[in-house]
Image (cartoon, rainbow, N blue to C red):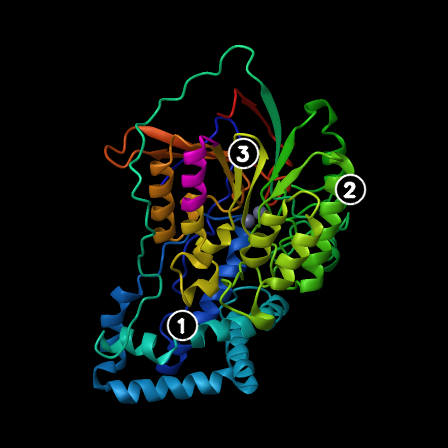
Amino acid sequence: MPRHGVSPGQGHRRSGLEQESDRTRGSPRLRLLWMGLPLIMALVLWAPAGAHPLPVQSQHVGRLVPQLRDAFGWWNLTCPVCKSLFTAIDFGLKKESGVEWVGSIATKLCKLLKIAPPAVCQSTVQLFEDDVVEVWTRSVLSPSEACGLLLGSTCGHWDVFSSWNISLPAVPKPAPQPPKPPAPGAPVSRILFLTDLHWDHDYLEGTDPDCENPLCCRQDSGLPPASRPGAGYWGEYSKCDLPLRTLESLLSGLGPAGPFDMVYWTGDIPAHNIWHQSRQDQLRALTTVTALVKKFLGPVPVYPAVGNHESTPVNGFPPPFIEGNHSSSWLYEAMAKAWESWLSPEALHTLRIGGFYALSPRPGLRLISLNMNFCSRENFWLLINSTDPAGQLQWLVGELQAAEDRGDKVHIIGHIPPGHCLKSWSWNYYRIVARYENTLAGQFFGHTHVDEFEVFYDEETLSRPLSVAFLAPSATTYIGLNPVSPPSLQVTGSTK
Ligand SMILES: [Zn+2]
Ligand SMILES: [Zn+2]
């Protein structure tokens, strides 16, 4: 996987709230079945306090199973009984009363374990319960998966987060070409790199910047004690996002840094009030901030990528095989409409299906915008099937091969950086980067809120650096960060 670095003198990361908790252990046997729900709640609620924490390691469920078998006497369970049990559980859970029941247990646990203030527990569970129960009954609690895990492969097949491989074309890899400086007088492009704006519609000056909720400086934060100042007019060094005026000021002040040929905008538009967000709230953030970007950047083409906060519940990005009201079509359709003037018809088509696209901003350059939520450890929909969700990586290989055949260069943009992904996704991405090192000229991500980079090394010796991903700092101050004026990149040299 890519290795991480932090640009000298840039940004800082808050830590200390990134550890997995084991406070959900020690429950009676039945409660174990619902363990996943509070775990997901816990993950979601703790994540904001640690900004965008380093990825939590995958659950090594397989290693726990023998201990759980011993502890709960599952050895006595036969395969048919196991499957009947889980069929009944799935049936019960999918009924409305089942979802409510799971929700009430999760709310009680959340309050009991003091995962969040009671009102936040209540709202979060209400927001997540429907989707999470849907996912759990289709994945870990499905008779085949659950009994495969509990009783072994003779009873069912457990492949949640199992490893997988995309296939690379038979075309031999061209000999690596060391990067060389551009010729004197080569053409120069200026690209603005925007990420993690996180507009808080409810930001309110004077409110408590250190409230007990996961996000403060807002209407529901209350007032600070007399000994402490309230939230500032432009923002605050605390767990707060930004008012619209600060984003407006940031965008209006870009003039001297330009003019720009294009903009890479790598997602996370709404605020971190993830316990209380409706689809309407998310769409208001999308259209309001898109309009603001258009207002200040005018005709400059903007190429967006989908962040993990664009959806609600946060991180909830079902792959395209999920249809109906649970699907992401409410979001992708709105994005395609809001971004129509920036993207080609071909790009809008794949955006509507899976939130990713490719286009050619200029001859010789292919831009690929990935939906990195399909690599995310926090995207609970991937419990159903995490194998190359939406076929995105296989599609990426096709795009890169076509670019190699044409002699084009490629830039990749996305939100979550590849080093923060599910292990199998990350390794497959790594293989692709290594295969197409001559074609891939740049990678740009956000999500961590700090100024960092990830270095990719060759697969043979793991010592020859062959690509770098740039991670831009956030516009938002969340948490305790300086609101960074967006970096601009100077891409020199012909793209060929
Ligand atoms: Zn963010
Ligand atoms: Zn993010």
Horizontal placement of 185 versus 296: left or right?
A: left
Amino acid on which disc 2 is placed: Arg
Cα distance in 3D space between marks 3 and 1: 39 Å
**Residue at numbered disc 3:** 11
Closest to the camera, between mark 1 and mark 2, is 1
Residue range of the region highlighted in magenta in the rendering: 397-408
Image position, residue 320 (x, y; %): 51, 63
Q: Give the overall secondary structure of the magenta segment.
A: helix
* Residues at discs 3 and 2 in contact (Cβ within 8 Å): no
Of 460 and 353, nearer the camera is 353
User: Around disc 3, counting alpha carbons within 10 Å, would you say few (fewer than 14), some (14 to 19), or many (20 or more)?
Assistant: some
Q: Label 2 crowding class (10 Å Cα cut-off): few <14, some 14-19, many 20+?
A: few
- Rendered residue at 53%/81% (across/down): 99
Q: Quadrant of residue 39?
A: bottom left
Residue type, label 1: Ser
User: Label for residue 139?
Assistant: 1
Query: Which badge, 3 or 2, is on the more N-terminal residue?
Result: 3
- Three-letter code, disc 3: Gly
Residue 325: % across, % down: 60, 72
Question: Does any portion of residue 224 appear in the rendered image?
Answer: no
The residue at which mark 2 appears reads as: 245
- Give SS at disc 1: loop
Label 3 sits on a secondary structure element that is loop
Does 96 sit left or right of 244 as displayed? left
